Image (cartoon, grey):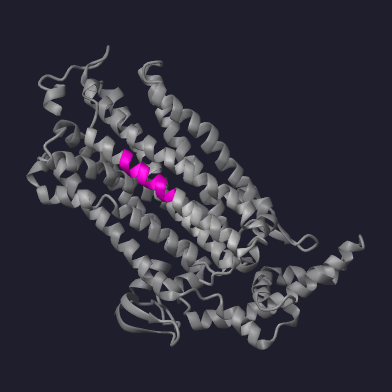
Amino acid sequence: MDLDIVGISRLQFAMTALYHFIFVPMTLGLSILVAVMETIYVATRRPIWRQITKFFGVLFGINFAVGVGTGLVMEFQFGMNWSYYSHYMGDIFGAPLAFEALMAFFLEATLVGMFYFGWDRITTKQHLLVTWGMAVGTNLSAMWILIANGWMQFPTAATINPYTMRMEMASVVGVIFSPVAQAKFLHVVTAGYTYAALFVIGVCSWFLLKKRHQEMSRRAIAAAAAFGLVGSISLIIMGDVSGIHVAEKQPMKMATIEGIWETEPAPAPFTVIAFPDQQARENHFAIKIPAVLGLISTHSTSKEIPGVKELIEQAQARVRNGIVAYDTMMQIQEYGKARQDAPAELLNRWNDTYKDLGYALLLKRYVDDPRTASDEQVLKAADDTLPVVWPLFWSFRIMVGLGFFFFALIAAFFYHAVKGCKFEDHPLLLRLAVWAIPLPVVACEMGWFVAEYGRQPWAVEGALPVAIAVSNLSAAAVLATVLGFIAIYTVLLVIMLKLMFRTVRKGPDPRELQPLPGDISMPGLSAASNA
């Protein structure tokens, strides 16, 4: 990445987004899992489930607070660091962003407060309703920002106004219910459910290895394993659905993450391991499984997956067609300045070519007016549609490999829970769960890297290049904020980890085992026996 204003602005947004997403999946999953735990308490009225709910509720709160703090900065970056993006896409992107802010800072935050301070102030069933409201609100908050991101991956239900050179929403329903956006939302939340389940299993496995809070840990692991098994299976299914959308809507991303340089006959093979060579545009030491990629990414045996070389040739044609769109738009704007309607011929030409305008804007990196671009500059612009392959190739495989590992690990705990086996009899499995606690963070970060870096050079796929979406700021000013944010976010991360470790080491409050009116006393289970 070049350390110019574009490169540094990208670095800043990537850094803040990756830091923020350390906390988001845990918040999404743990909010639902805590609600499930409290539901079991209300259904059984066994105090141990209230203890479990409150203990993991505290861990949820720590994660939620730091997540909100890191997310606030991202809201402001759109206007400060990506001002032309905000101008060009604001009519569409602003709506889901506003809904996300309302959900996160009004509904979600209010219900989180009621969850913590309402235990002794409202009835048990009312508190359960608050907890489920908090969980649903948390996930709906994520839905809106993921709708916005899904639209950036696949802009739909929108048109470009040639008079103003801004994108305008054609259908709010089309934006919200875009299949790409909905698949992204479900993929992210199921990742969060898997993450939360592994976190609960890992923490309780540590308790069991230390011979502490054994009764609580066994119950929490059983609940988390059942929840996580559903989440991990859904995660794999939604990953498959997302892969189909990528193959259809973002073919260059698909070709990049799979290292497909040449279009291969259908069904395409899956490359398990390879060392992509960007300069030679070929793979070294590739190990392939015949037909697998074609089957999982297209669900057919007849659809080809185009390779990088073919896609770059297609990009060249789209750049040239985009130049026609750019020229047409400039002529229409002249009529607009004169307060006249553009002739039908121009408008018809615009309707035939405007979808390739973004490809002409790629030329802005090399020339002020795309209409004056040379053939060499057109070739460079087309080549820019190819990201660096090797980091995407390996990031995708790390993410997928970890996803299947999570499923296997959770399934093992679920099996032992169903069989009624004591988890303490399997210390290696418990140790594996403890060491696996940070791995969902790695998988989630790899997933976002694939999603965001994989669509480069686009801020909005096929419509707005990153190079012209940036604000007119000095590189030094943005670099200073990057360094400042890294320092602040690192401090927040350290504080969060210390609070988490301190809370886990302290363990659940033994006083929560005292039965309340309406609770069922559990013979043989006391604060001492559970400690």
Q: Nearer the viewer, residue 21 or 328?
A: 21
Q: Nearer the viewer, residue 218 or 269?
A: 218
Residue 384, horizontal then vertical, whole percent: 56, 77
Q: Is residue 514 left or right of residue 389?
A: left
- Residue drawn at the location 25% of the way across and 22% of the way down: 512
Determine whether 487 is above or below 354 in the image. above
- Residue drawn at the location 40% of the way across and 15% of the way down: 121
Q: Is residue 173 left or right of residue 207?
A: right
Reply yes or no: does residue 493 show up in magenta: yes
What is the count of numbered marks? 0
Residue 511, horizontal then vertical, whole percent: 23, 20
Determine whether 14 is above or below 204 in the image. below
- Residue drawn at the location 61% of the way across and 48% of the way down: 173
> Seen from this angle, which residue lies furthest left?
425
> Which secondary structure class fits the magenta region best?
helix
Residue 131 visible in the picture: yes
Residue 356, horizontal then vertical, whole percent: 66, 72
Reply yes or no: does residue 445 show up in magenta: no
Q: Quadrant of residue 531?
A: top left
Determine whether 336 is above or below 90 in the image. below
Residue 23 visible in the picture: no
> Seen from this angle, which residue lies furthest top?
517
- Residue drawn at the location 71% of the way across and 72% of the way down: 353
Q: Is residue 506 left or right of residue 425?
A: right
Residue 348, horizontal then vertical, whole percent: 79, 70
Determine whether 249 is above or below 227 in the image. below
Q: Is residue 427 left or right of residue 87?
A: left
Q: Nearer the viewer, residue 297 or 515?
A: 515
Highlighted range, magenta: 489-499
